[in-house]
Amino acid sequence: MMNSDLEDKLFERFPWAEAKDPNTGEGLGYLTPCWCGDGWFQLIWNMFEEIENVYKAKGIPINVVIWEIKEKYASMQTVLCKGIPEIIDITDKYEKLSEEVCESCGDKGSIRDMFGWLTVYCDQCFKNEIE
């Protein structure tokens, strides 16, 4: 799970990415869950900025519900519940970019097999993890 200080920075800058109650749609007062390492913080920040820019270019309020952001099969998966179709291209772009960014530190990484679990690590973080 991402460091709570980093999640707080994202939530402060992108309040529209607030976690929502699945039954009522009410905001829960914190960022949608980021079930990934700190190394993907900048990817998420950039993705959120691009999502905002699409809405601004269309002149409409940001109306996105992100259920979660998680690591799965060595890439960043963004699970959307609500949004305009154009943001699918953005989330797909960042899913692909995440496959080359160390999930732990944010440096250039590659997909590694960690005892049957695929994830993205740079050489140093991979070495640290297996030791």
Image (tube, grey):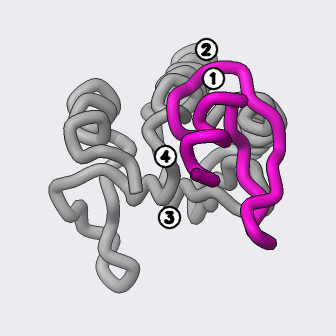
Residue 46 screen position, x and y as percent: 55, 21
Tell me if label 3 and label 4 are in contact, CB under 8 Å: no
Q: Is mark 1 on a helix, strand or loop?
A: helix
Query: Distance between the Cα atoms at labels 3 and 2?
Result: 24 Å
Say which label, 2 or 4, has the lower sequence index.
4
Specify the farthest residue to the left.
29
Say which label, 3 or 1, has the lower sequence index.
1
The residue that mark 3 highlights is: 67
The residue that mark 1 highlights is: 54
Residue 53 screen position, x and y as percent: 57, 17
**Residue at position x 30%, y 44% from top?**
3
Res. 55 visible in picture: no
Say which label, 3 or 2, has the lower sequence index.
2
**Residue at position x 48%, y 59% from top?**
35
Q: Which of marks 3 and 2 is in front?
A: 3
Residue 57 screen position, x and y as percent: 61, 14
Q: As shown in the figure, which amino acid type bears the numbered disc 2?
A: Ala
Quarter-wise, where is residue 87 in the image?
A: top right
